[in-house]
Every structure is written in C-alpha cells, then in structure tokens.
Amino acid sequence: MRYHTGNLDDGTLLSLYEKMLKPRMIEEKMLILLRQGKISKWFSGIGQEAISIGVTAALKTEEYILPMHRNLGVFTTRDVPLHRLFAQWQGKASGFTKGRDRSFHFGSQEHKIVGMISHLGPQLGVADGIALADVLGRKKRVTAVFTGEGATSEGDFHEALNVASVWNLPVLFCIENNGYGLSTPTKEQYNCEHLADRAKGYGMESRIIDGNNILEIYTKVNELCKALRKRPRPVLLEFKTFRMRGHEEASGTKYVPEKLMKQWAQKDPIRNYEQFLLKSGILDEGKIESLKTAISKEISENLEIAFNESSIQSNKSVELSDVYQKYDFEVFEKSELSNNIRLVDALSEGLRQSMERHNNLVIMGQDVAEYGGVFKITEGFTKAFGRSRVRNTPICESVIISAAMGLSINKMKAVVEMQFADFVSSGFNPIVNYLAKIHYRWGQNADVVIRMPCGGGVGAGPFHSQTNEAWFTKTPGLKVVYPAFPDDAKGLLNTAINDPNPVLFFEHKGLYRSVYGDVPENYYTLPFGQAGVVREGKDVTIVSYGAGIHWALDTLEQHPDIDAELIDLRTLQPLDMESIYTSVEKTNRLIILQEDSLFGGVASDISAMVMEHRFEYLDAPVKRVASLETPIPFAANLETEYLPKQRFEAALLDLMSY
C-alpha cells in the first residue's frame, strides 16, 4: 500500500494512527464482552477504521456527521466519552438513549453526530436537511453521511442524491463498499462496476477512494471539504474496503471465500499504516506500546464506570413524558377584528403570519413556490419570503420529510405539504420511524408540520380522496390535527408550527372553498387537546371532526326535535376524552361519526374508552358510523354510497328510538 504524506506534518500523521488504534482496541474488547454476554450485539468495523477516522478528522467539529454501525471511529474521534458509549451498549441510563435503543442508534448534538435508524435510507435525506439549514444560514459547512453499498439500492438513496444535486447542498455521501450486504455479494445487489458512477445521472461529482488508506482518505476528503465550503455542492464518495468480521457477530463469515479474506487481511488499514510510520521513523515500538497501554487503561477505567452503574429501572411517567418534547403552549389571543373567509384562506393567512413570525421556517412541497400549491394556499409566498424559504421539491416525499427532520436537527422549522394526503404513503417510513421516535430515543425534537389535504366528496377517486388519519393516531410521538372550521384551522396551524413535535395537519379538500367563517385578522393560537362544543344539547352526544361535523349539522337541521350536543374533536392526538365523558354523563347516549372507514379508526377507540370508563351512564349502545370498507370510488353515485353522511341520519334516529 502506498502512502503519500503531502504536506502533512508528523503530528498529524501520528494522530491519525492513534485515532485508528483506539476504535480497533475498543472493538477487540467488545468482542470479548459479547462472548461473555455483557453486551447484546455487535456490528464490527474491523478493517474499515480508516474511513471513519479520515472523514471525521477532515471535518470541523461544528459540522454534522451521520454515521452507521461500523463507524465507531466517528464517535471516538469526536471525543464522545467512552463510559457513555459503554453504558449505551449495555442499556444503562447514562447512555444516550436511556436504555431505549441499542448500539449506534443515537445522536448527540454536543458532538454534532446524528445516529442511524435500522431502515438506513432516511438518514441520507436528513443530511440534506442539515446541509440546507447551513446553506440558508450562510454557514460555510459540510455535512457527511455514511451508508453501505447495500442501502444504495433503497429509494431514499436516489432521492437524497437528486435533491442534494438540484439544491446544490454541501453533502458528502460516503459509501462504505465492503462487498457484502450481510451475506449478499455486490454482484447480486447492483449491476454497475462502480457505485460512484451513479453520480453522473444526478449531475454530481464523485470519487473512488481506497477505503483502507488513511492518508488517501484524509487528504482527499479534506481537500473536498475546503472546496465545498467555498462552493456548496454534493459529492458521492465510494470507499472500496472490506469488513473482516460478519455483518454482526452472530452471522459469522462462512459465506466469504477464504481466499478473499486472506487478500483483504493483507490490506489491514492499521497494520499497514503502522509499518509505514515505523519505516518513516515517525513511530517506534516503544511509542506503540505506550499508546496501547494508555488506550487499554482508558478502556478499562471507563468500562468500570459503566459496569458499576446499576441497571436501568422503568418509570412509567418518565417513559410516557419522554415520547414528546415538553411544550409550554403560548397563548396568542384572538383580536376583535375579523373577516368572513373560507377555510382555504384561513390556512393561507395562518401560514403567512407564521412565516413572518418565524424567520427560520421553511415550506417545502411539490409546486408550492410560484404556482402556489395545487390548492393555492402558498400563492404569493415566494414574492413575500423568497424561493429559499418556499421550496419546490422533486416528487420524492420520503426524502423531503427526512430533510425536514434534518432542518429541525439544525435548529430550523419545516412545513411540508403533501400534495394530497394519499401521497404520504411514499413518505410513511420517516414519519413513523424517524420523526415519531426521535425524541423518545435520544431527546431530539422533530419541529415538523406535514400538511395533509384529504377527504372525499369531490370525485377524486381512490388515490386523491383518503382521510388516513388513523395511520398516525396510533403512532406514539406524533400529533394529529383535523379542523372543521376556518377560525380553528388558522389558530391550530399556528400552534402546530410553534410546537416542537411532529404534527400531521389534516385539511379537508371538500371544505377548502365551501365553508366560511369569521376569522380574526391577527396572529393567534389555539391549544391542542381541547375539543370544541359546536352545539349544546341534552338528548344525545355526537362526536365527529372534519367534514363529519358539517354532515352532522346538516342532519340536525332536518331534525330540529333532536336536542343533540355536537362535539368537534379538532385534534385527534392529543384527544380530549374529558369533554366526551362530560357530555355522555349529561346525555347518556353517544354516536361517533368519521369519514374514515370503520375498522381501526378513531371512532373505535372513543367507543371503547367510553364503554370502559362511562358505561354506567349509557342508556343505549354506543353507535359508530363511518365509510364503507372499500377504497374510495370515483363515480358520484358510488362515492355517495361510500361516504357515511346518509347512513348517519338512519343511525342517529335508531339510537334516539332505542
């Protein structure tokens, strides 16, 4: 192996050796502890240390880096305390996830490290968002993100490269090509000679680097970082390397030909570099021994700290309170001046006033810039706030949601518009596995609002009409809002943007231009978790949200003899059960109306909770009314039969006659 020192001084050359030696020695110790049953799992990076060290050493400490399982060297080079790493791997409280996640599934804002999730791909989009925040803040910084060659087959990889290229984001996409995705060789994963060649299709630069040559990695990455800080743009780096142990220890290496193992053993990045330093006179055997002694002592002392820490104990209240970041709702009162406007106008007004209030707020989505979005809610926003803050995106929901997460990590806010709520399925993974879990896992907030134009009644068919709130109400960590009136929509949207937790904000398309209301002119907020009583009554409680509220009002107009109390939930997570309980105690009857299909919907949970906690107040069975258990049809007569409005009237009359 050839090493070219260039203008690197002896101190730097020696430092790179020390930085590689430490993770190797930690790993060797962890393999012993694994066999002793003192840690549960280990993903070895032996043979790949040069990549982690070279890239991390080339970055500035204030620049974010997003590692994977085999990047222990990232953490040690960033001086993460070893006792906390060891506690993390043992599931102790002083680790980074309070025992809630294992191995390297964590981040640390202090060290500017953002750990992976097992789905791999989303972190590439997160890197895009972090880099975007730096560009918008005019900070001359680079973001580095790691992935393996196996994950380059995921859609998120291609989406992330495309967005980074279109937006000229200073991201180093680092592929550690070690030849195998678990046991699957590269020839069964992709059909091109070099993964770096894929950059051409995205208009990006790329480099192929010897992943076992620490000096080649450090000098080339350092040179690239300097260039990207001056002229932001993404670069794809393919590091050719090999892992000398299994995907994780339980898998072994029997699937690797013995000849190949021997070839790569000769390319060991530490042993070869050590021999180079010895021959150069920069290092001697005495220095090696003293370094190993010092590192071994550091490992032992920190292991003792971690071992001496008692096992973590579960505390129900702590566990529940950490699902969401604590948010002290700030009240902004409504002004007396108001205008009678449509729901679509109220949303636009709230979004505009929030953009004025939060200089760090970015709107992203398909056609949201000059075109104003397909529903024109952001019309005129580019003129008011500029294209840097109102950003058209490629059609790639997954990476844009991940990028919104990256913006939040880098101290910004994001509103993402799904062109239609149906399309959120293409971005489902980062919502339910990244945004929803990140605060519970390592205390990072996800300051993201996802706007969801939804609902039927407009003849849009199966792919543009779903009201899919139940996909998200059952996912801990998400908040779900679903207003029915213009004034609620504006106030709740402002609150959603203020809230540091991820919010799914549902907006019924059929109400956009059909429902009017008096909406205060000023910026105001409304609290989550407080239902609205649209109409008071004593004979029956009707609970609904969104378009269902208006269907209920229409039905009650046809039956003035029914003295119904109509409750508009407004938010589905958090859910205001106390208002429902109070009403049921008064009326002794309950009917729940939802546009979503019946099974697994919000109505089922409300019904179950009332039966559990207020059964003695009921004079009749709880009724649930919902859409048919089919996809949403297009033809008007079919859609009318699908939706529950007509069935609601019959169910209400049946309940009243019970």
Image: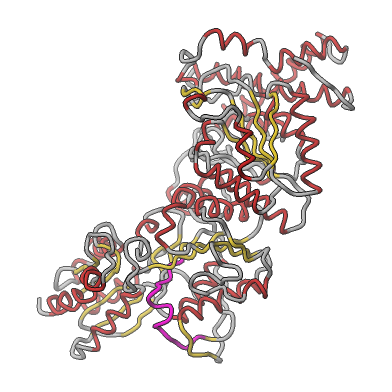
199 relative to 63 in the view: left or right: left
Res. 389 image quadrant: bottom right
**Residue at the image position 62 percent from the left and 10 percent from the top:** 263
Compared across the picture, whether 40 is left or right of 598 comes to: right
Q: Would residue 164 be seen by someone viewing this image from the given angle?
A: yes
Above-or-below relation of 100 to 402? above
* Residue closest to the eye, 426 or 591: 426
Q: Quadrant of residue 515?
A: bottom left
Q: Residue at x 36, y 73 (%)?
A: 546
| Position in image of residue 210 (x %, y %) | 70, 23
Queried whether the magenta region covers residue 543, the answer comes back as no
- Residue 103's place in the image compared with 265, above or below, is below
- Between 226 and 126, the one lying in front of the other is 226
Quarter of the image with the C terminus in it: bottom left
Residue appearing at x 69%, y 36% in the figure: 206
Seen in the picture, residue 628 relative to 298 is either above or below; the reply is: below
> What range is drawn magenta here?
505-519
Where is residue 222 drawn, in percent x and y? 79, 35
Where in the figure is residue 72, as x and y percent of width and height? 63, 29
Count of residue discs: 0
Q: Visible in this render: residue 306?
A: no
Q: Position of residue 466 (x, y in %)?
A: 35, 63
Q: Is residue 507 magenta?
A: yes
The answer to which of 150 and 299 lies nearer the viewer is: 150
The quadrant holding residue 650 is bottom left
Is residue 543 shown left or right of residue 282? left
